[in-house]
Amino acid sequence: MRNNISFKTVTALVLAGILTVCPLAVAFSGTVRAAESPLSGFTEIDISTQAELIEFAENCHSESWSYDKYVVLKNDINLTSDEFTGIPIFSGLFDGNGHTIYGYNNEGTGYVQGLFRYVGKTGIVQNLSVDADIIAAGDGYVTGIIAGVNDGVIKNCFAKGAVKGDTATGGICGINGRDGLITGCKNLAEITGFYYTGGISGRNYGAIRNCVNYGSIDSTPEWVSENDERQVDIISEITGDVSIVSYQPGVDIGGITGFSRGIITDSRNEGIVGYERVGYNVGGICGRQSGIIYGCTNYGPVKGKKDVGGIVGQQEPYIEVDKAKSITDSIARINALTNHVASDAAGATPDIQEALAALQAASGKAMDDAQSMTGNASDYKLDDNRDWAGMIEQQAENAGKAAADSVRESYSELFDELTAQDIPSYDELMELIERYDDPVIPDELKEEADELKQEAEKEKEEAREEAQHEREQIGNEINSSINGEIGRWNSALDNLDKNSEIIANDLQQVRYASDVLISVANMYSTQLSNDIMAVNASINDTYRLIDDLISGTQDEGIKYLFSDVSEADNPDMINGRTIGCINYGSASGDINVGGIAGNLSVDDENLESSVIMTFDLSAGEGYAISSIIQDCENSGVVRLRSTCGGGIAGNMEHGCIKGCRGYGGIISEEGEYIGGVAGSSHGSIVSSYALCTLSGKGFAGGIAGYAEKVKNCVSMPIFRDIDGKCGAVAGQILRDSETESIDSTDFYGNYYVSGDYYGIDDISYDGIASELAYEDSLLLKGIPDEFSNLKVIFVADGKILSEVRASYGDRVENLNLPSIPDKDGSYGIWPDLSGVRVTGNLMIEAEYVSHVAVIRTEKEYHDAGKPVALMQGQFKATDVLTASITDAPFEPDDGSAYTDVTIYSVCFEGSGDLNSFSGELRLYSPYEEYSVWTRKNGTWTAVDFSAEGSYAQLTMDSAVAMYAITRTPDEKLKYAGYAAIAILLLAGAVALIVKASRSVKRTSGGTKTLEK
């Protein structure tokens, strides 16, 4: 059986953390600098340099050395020396004083890695920031930036950088032990690991409060690639036995912690957790937990393959072993109800008082006999006051992890022999042991396991022989214990029969007395009649407990000794709870995806197993199990590819959801079983609300896709694209196997708002699943305010773009639709919303369409048969390009005159910011040689372009523009023209010369004549 933190332990743990920290606050009161007021009895050590830090680390190889040390960091320290490999163990007070240690790069091979490898039970590390890059190599299984293992207090610390770990990896620490407290810490580092990976702690057995993760957790493609290659058998590394089944990596991943048996309170995650379709047990706060999560919030996207939740991936139950006590409790309830009847009947008639006295006497005798039966409760269980799994776990811890793994095989052979001779259910007992045997090395055995590991590396053969020896020795010890137990148990079963007959007779007398009372009190008051009916109902429950106890122990086998008591909410069973948490982030996976929890079940070794099956431990009543999700709320989008998705829980093999609210959308791409509260539930759903949109293939319900118990719930679902069984309360429920009737004790008081589908499988049942008008639903007692404040949720690529408040009946097409971001070569469009009205919390998801690479004008250039213009880029189908030829005047800035000019007016119409528009434009040119001009501010200027066939390609830098294409004259004609002009000019010049020459001659001739 798994170890569980008791309430006293929890209280002591928290108080220990407070009392440990509080004296420091007192000591430092009245002063600003802690160093000026050292603790009484402590030796103060100031660290200002790298060398001083290294010297301090060397002194910390002895745990006792640091008990009385008060260390104060005086400066930021750049830790670049290879000499520093971490502070081995620290048990004093280390005050970072708000400073940062950075440059710490560690690729060591130690089993535990961190700035502080171990923080002891009396150790406190506070007010420190560490920026590190840590890679776990070799045997580096436990890795953290601040600490590897914390058994003390880590307060107000920050982790930055990156951690690449293996088995227990966290930003603050790898493992937070049972005495550990982490409070007020933040992680900003990128964290990757293969098992138990979290932003604050890899594994948590203590308390984590008021912490925040901003870093990404197992979310990179590089991690996915390494994870795919990581099919490593951890157990075989320790034992050398390769026959043992290997473990799938990528398991137990959380924003705060990967795995927790402790407490997580008032913490939040804002980082990305997980990778699409990779990883098991992935949660925004915790990957897998059986402790307590209280008041936590997730804002980041959570991704995985199976068991994925906005808060917790997989929640395991609290288990209590004491069957006979549960019968006693049931009879005690009868006794209490009887006393309540007496209170309500005060002052009644004498015949009522006489019947009441008989009833009280009968219930009192039943109580006395039941207490006597409880005194012998240990006789009805194998091993004195211990369950088998607990006994074997103790033996395993005595021998170490290696021996424990080897012992399993001996158990199997031993139980096979016992099965044939004594009890026909020992094979089932073996299943129980295997199911509850923790594969994680106990904290107190870390050093022992490390020594075994080192020894195995040096002398593997000797280690195997030693493990075999331990296995045989423990097997013999358990064999002896079992042989003794069986004889005593068989004898005790005979006594159980007799005691049960006594109790049954007592109950018959109580039933007779109550019947007499109700016959005389029927007309007295309705309240009194109701009280007596409650007594009878409790009697029926107790009969069933006794009957199941006897049949479970003698006929049906060990597995029928289990019952789900989550709905009863026993205050003594405090673990296995998630309370008061809110998820705003998206959760996506293949199987078992929930807004709060992916799966409520016990972790299955077969991580790929089908989820639509009844959990073996849910049928009987011998062991009490409890798993509760209470007062939680989901507003994020839940998306799954295959099976089981719910607003609160994807799948419930057991447990109870009570007082929860599912407001986010649930989308199943290919699978079935989706619900506003739970996808598939074999447990109970009580007093919960669903106001959401569901889309999937079938078995869809406003509260649950499949359910076995739904009580006092209210749903207002909107169904989109549903193909299969569907109901406003439930798509499918548990019915009587023979009569197909509905058990009204398991289904009652449920309401749904009128919509497309009726209550259960599209049928309304009065008192079980009743229809209400929207206005009437607002009058229900306790109805959340969200039902009167509806909203339309716009989603793209799994992310909520905006939430718009709307009233019932509003037309969606009249709302302000947000713009959709592009992604991966495609763009988003909203579906046709014509006529769609708001009838609940309506989620509308954008559809993505591949971008259009080229758009063209409808207008073609005259008889060319080609578009006037084209534009290249990424466009939407609604984008439009137009171009027309105009007769606008063309006056270029160079003053030239062009006779052949074509002028285009071009306009681009589309979404987005057109003020900053730019696109690659092609304009048709009717000329072989041409220039391109554009007009801006009334002036035509030449632009750069390239000739692409019949088009000029240029950059259009505004949504509206005017371009001119001018013909460039043919070069041959141009030169011929130039030659003609030159000839003409030359001819003109010759003519002038000739004329001038003749003029001179005439003048000269006249003179000569005169001379004669």
Image (spheres, helix red, strand yellow):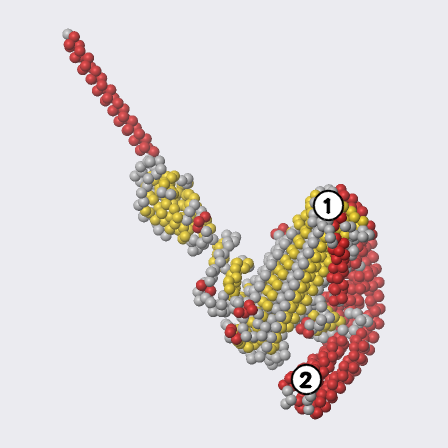
Q: How far apart are marks 1 and 2 (CA)?
A: 71 Å
Work out whether residue 690 or residue 587 is closer to the camera in this orientation and state it: 690
Q: Is residue 945 above or below residue 97?
A: above
Q: In this view, does 149 lie above or below 931?
A: below
Local crowd at mark 1 within 10 Å, few (<14), some, or many (≥20)?
A: some
In the picture, residue 332 is in which quadrant? bottom right
Question: What type is the residue that disc 1 sits on?
Answer: Lys
Reading the chain from its start, which is encountered first: label 1 or label 2? Answer: 1
Residue 344, disc: 2
Say what secondary structure mark 1 lies in.
loop
Quarter the C terminus occupies: top left
Q: Please give the name of the residue rendered at 44% of the width and 67% of the height, measured from the top-left corner.
A: 835
Residue where numbered disc 1 is placed: 74
Q: Please give the name of the residue rendered at 61% of the width and 79% of the height, measured from the top-left corner.
A: 744
Say what secondary structure mark 2 lies in.
helix
Local crowd at mark 2 within 10 Å, few (<14), some, or many (≥20)?
A: some
Quarter the N terminus occupies: bottom right
